């Protein structure tokens, strides 16, 4: 189980989008972000913001649909960005069929509903646990990871 590094309040949707923009500057090839939280907690909103920011850096703009029904969206960027929503998977082997294991080594991977991976989740992944707060009026995100992530996220935590 990864260590709790810190918690960050997200008072509104704009704060969630700003977090995605800031994380877009921090992630690199081989990074896996495991996005946990109930429906409506901000996982997809965060992922869209991160992807849009990475694409904007390449002077590209693209519609970023939720991968709920397609299971996986891959974006041609440097490196590739894989956005998966595993909610509908019934067995971890289905994640292997999507090619996620190979992507974990070379792409930036954003995985919603990572519990469906079971033991396939990379040990070096960063978990972002989104929670509804104030009766759903705002959110909070907990960052769980190892010492490498703690060092990389210092500026984010201290902002």
Image (cartoon, grey):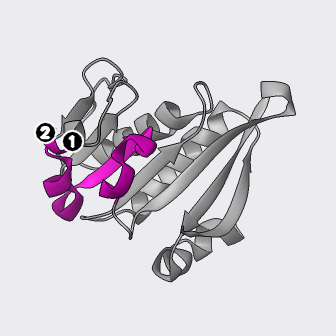
Q: Quadrant of the N terminus?
A: bottom right
Q: Nearer the viewer, residue 84 or 119?
A: 119
Expressed as whole percent of the image width and height from the top left, the position of residue 53 reads 38, 45
Q: Residue furthest top?
A: 69
Looking at the image, residue 143 lies above or below residue 99: below
Q: Is residue 109 visible?
A: yes
Please tell me whether residue 40 belongs to the stretch shown in magenta: no
At horizontal 25% and vertical 43% (from top left) the residue drawn is 82
* Marks 1,2: beta carbons within 8 A: yes
> What range of the chain is rendered magenta?
96-121
Looking at the image, residue 54 lies above or below residue 68: below
Expressed as whole percent of the image width and height from the top left, the position of residue 128 reads 55, 52
Expressed as whole percent of the image width and height from the top left, the position of residue 88 reads 35, 24
Report the magenta stretch's main SS: helix
Q: Is 85 left, or right, of 22 in this rendering?
A: left
At horizontal 30% and vertical 17% (from top left) the residue drawn is 69
Expressed as whole percent of the image width and height from the top left, the position of residue 32 reads 35, 58
Query: What secondary structure is found at the residue carrying circle 1?
Result: helix
Residue of label 1: 93
Q: Which mark is residue 97?
A: 2
């Amino acid at each position: 189980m990864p260590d709790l590094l810190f918690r960050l309040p997200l008072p509104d949707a704009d704060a969630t989008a700003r977090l995605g923009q800031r994380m877009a500057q921090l992630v690199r090839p081989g990074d896996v972000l495991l996005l946990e939280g109930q429906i409506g907690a901000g996982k997809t909103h965060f992922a869209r913001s991160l992807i849009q920011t990475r694409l904007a850096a390449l002077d590209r703009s693209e519609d970023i649909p939720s991968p709920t029904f397609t299971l996986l969206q891959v974006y041609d960027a440097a490196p590739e960005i894989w956005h998966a929503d595993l909610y509908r998977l019934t067995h971890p082997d289905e994640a292997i069929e999507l090619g996620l294991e190979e992507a974990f080594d070379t792409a930036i991977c954003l995985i919603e509903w990572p519990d469906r991976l079971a033991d396939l989740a990379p040990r070096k992944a960063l978990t972002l646990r989104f929670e509804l707060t104030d009766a759903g009026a705002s959110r909070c995100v907990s960052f769980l990871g190892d010492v490498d992530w703690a060092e990389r996220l210092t500026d984010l935590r201290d902002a």
